[in-house]
């Protein structure tokens, strides 16, 4: 159900067979959290399921194909969208990568595979850290 002023999102916590998590650094051109590290995530298309949205965003943001292992939780945050406060509802999924080559859309972006104990070595915000920890607690 779409409530005006609310947005639905889906996030992909990608974990490989070595139990490493994929983090992507946002481009400095992004209005929201530029150059911050986080998991691939984005808005759902109209009529798109959260699972499909997580896999589509993963492919758009990293070039990776993946499969949903399971939903690991939900989170929400408030953002400013065109001067209006918007409540964002996000479904978070643990994803197993089916391909290995990460391709990022912007040249100033970066990616890194980290073990859970290494996550705080990069500039990851608390929100993304919580999303990753949701997935780790249930894996």
Image (cartoon, rainbow, N blue to C red):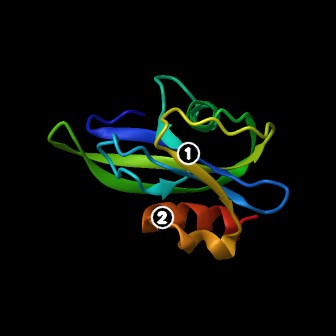
Disc nearer the start of the sequence (2/1): 1
| Crowd around label 2: few <14 · some 14–19 · many ≥20 (10 Å) | some
Residue drawn at x 76%, y 64% as measured from the top left: 139
Residue 71 locus on image (x, y percent): 66, 51
Identify the image quadrant of residue 53: top right
Q: Is residue 99 above or below residue 87?
A: above
Residue 27 locus on image (x, y percent): 42, 43
Q: Is residue 55 above or below residue 41?
A: above
Marker disc for residue 124: 2
- The Cα atoms of the two marked residues, 2 and 1, are separated by 13 Å
Marker disc for residue 40: 1
Question: Viewer-proximal residue, 27 or 57?
Answer: 27
Helix, strand or loop status at disc 1: loop
Helix, strand or loop status at disc 2: loop
Residue drawn at x 49%, y 57% as measured from the top left: 37
Residue drawn at x 46%, y 42% as measured from the top left: 108
Residue drawn at x 57%, y 30% as measured from the top left: 60
| Crowd around label 1: few <14 · some 14–19 · many ≥20 (10 Å) | many
Residue 110 locus on image (x, y percent): 55, 48
Question: Viewer-proximal residue, 107 or 29?
Answer: 107
Q: Is residue 93 above or below residue 53?
A: below
Residue most extreme to the front: 107
Residue 45 locus on image (x, y percent): 48, 25
Residue most extreme to the top: 46
Question: Viewer-proximal residue, 124 or 67?
Answer: 124
The reply, left or right, for residue 9 in relation to residue 80 is right
| Residue contact at pointers 2 and 1, CB within 8 angstroms | no
Quadrant in which the N terminus appears: top left
The reply, left or right, for residue 122 in relation to residue 4 is right
The reply, left or right, for residue 5 in relation to residue 13 is left
């Amino acid at each position: 159900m779409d409530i005006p002023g609310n947005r639905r999102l889906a996030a992909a916590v990608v974990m490989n067979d070595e139990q490493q998590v994929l983090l992507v650094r946002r481009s400095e051109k992004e209005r929201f959290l530029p150059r911050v590290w986080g998991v691939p995530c984005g808005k759902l298309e109209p009529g798109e399921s959260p699972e499909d949205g997580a896999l589509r965003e993963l492919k758009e943001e990293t070039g990776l194909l993946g499969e949903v292992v399971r939903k690991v939780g939900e989170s929400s945050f408030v953002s400013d969208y065109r001067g209006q406060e918007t409540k964002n509802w996000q479904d978070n999924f643990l994803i197993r990568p089916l391909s290995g080559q990460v391709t990022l859309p912007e040249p100033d972006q970066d990616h890194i595979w980290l073990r859970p104990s290494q996550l705080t070595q990069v500039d990851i915000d608390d929100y993304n850290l919580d999303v990753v920890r949701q997935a780790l607690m249930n894996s």
